[in-house]
Image (cartoon, grey):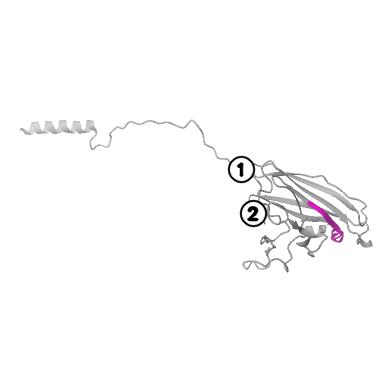
């Protein structure tokens, strides 16, 4: 074969290879594109609650007089259950001595999905035997300062001596806010407030018969701060 013919054949072969895409990296592929007709969205839940209560003043109390009630209603206005509800009573003014002579004769809680529970029921808990002097009657001062006395039910955590204590159910208690149902003392198995549910707390009182003359004209007031958590693990 003549040299000229070889050159022509080589050129024809190169053109054929390029046309076929061999070795050039330009081979064509069929493809198609489709998109879902739905949009997928993730929204985080919200935890929210609203409190309904009415300011009340009980005036001209005399020793031995019973009075009340104070009714507090808490509605779960969020989109998730409140697993653990805690509360902290704070004396906001007046005489702590008077608070020590105001007896808490009834302390009820209504837990949506569970029902009414009494904090003076020995079958559930008798709170007067858990705090303060560990004896009835339970006073307003003891509730405001409620904690499990170090000398009785608990021992400090070795990692933080003196700061956390175990109550008789084996729960750690640090602040006076472990006294609400949902967990803590009552050990309610269901959430404290289910979505859309209404929790209630009801107090009734008595001005102790042994109140002294030094309490004439005395007054005391308090507020309660409620904290809602997803789980017991978040408690203060």
Tell which tag, 2 or 1, sits nearer the viewer: 2
Q: Position of residue 60 (x, y in %)?
A: 93, 52
Q: Which residue is mark 2?
A: 232
Which stretch did the figure color magenta? 95-107
Eyeballing the image, is 86 above or below 21? below
Q: Are marks 2 and 1 in contact (CB under 8 Å)?
A: no
Crowd around label 2: few <14 · some 14–19 · many ≥20 (10 Å): some
- Left or right: where 89 falls relative to 101: left
The image quadrant that residue 80 belongs to is top right
Residue 45, label in figure? 1
- Element at badge 1? loop
- Left or right: where 195 falls relative to 96: left
Residue 94 seen in the current view: no
The C terminus lies in quadrant: bottom right
Eyeballing the image, is 219 above or below 165? above
Q: Position of residue 139 (x, y in %)?
A: 82, 59
Residue drawn 81% across the image and 51% down it: 203
Residue 43 seen in the current view: yes
Q: Earlier in the sequence, mark 2 or mark 1?
A: 1
């Amino acid at each position: 074969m003549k040299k000229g013919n070889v050159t022509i054949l080589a050129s024809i072969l190169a053109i054929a290879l390029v046309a076929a895409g061999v070795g050039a990296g330009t081979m064509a592929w069929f493809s198609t594109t489709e998109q879902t007709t739905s949009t997928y969205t993730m929204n985080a839940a919200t935890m929210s609650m609203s409190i309904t209560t009415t300011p009340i003043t009980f005036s001209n109390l005399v020793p031995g007089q019973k009075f009340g009630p104070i009714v507090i209603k808490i509605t779960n206005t969020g989109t998730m259950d409140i697993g653990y509800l805690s509360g902290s009573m704070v004396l906001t003014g007046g005489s702590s001595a008077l608070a020590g002579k105001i007896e808490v004769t009834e302390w009820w809680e209504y837990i949506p999905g569970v029902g009414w529970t009494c904090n003076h029921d020995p079958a559930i808990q008798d709170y007067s035997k858990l705090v303060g002097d560990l004896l009835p009657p339970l006073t307003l001062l003891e509730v405001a300062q409620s904690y499990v006395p170090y000398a009785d039910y608990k021992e400090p955590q070795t990692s933080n001596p003196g700061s956390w204590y175990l109550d008789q159910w084996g729960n750690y208690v640090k602040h006076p806010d472990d006294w609400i149902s949902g967990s803590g003392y009552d050990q309610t198995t269901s959430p404290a407030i289910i979505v859309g549910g209404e929790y209630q707390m009801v107090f009734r009182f008595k001005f102790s018969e042994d109140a002294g003359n030094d309490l004439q004209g005395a007054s005391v007031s308090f507020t309660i701060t409620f904290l809602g958590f997803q789980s017991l693990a978040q408690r203060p």
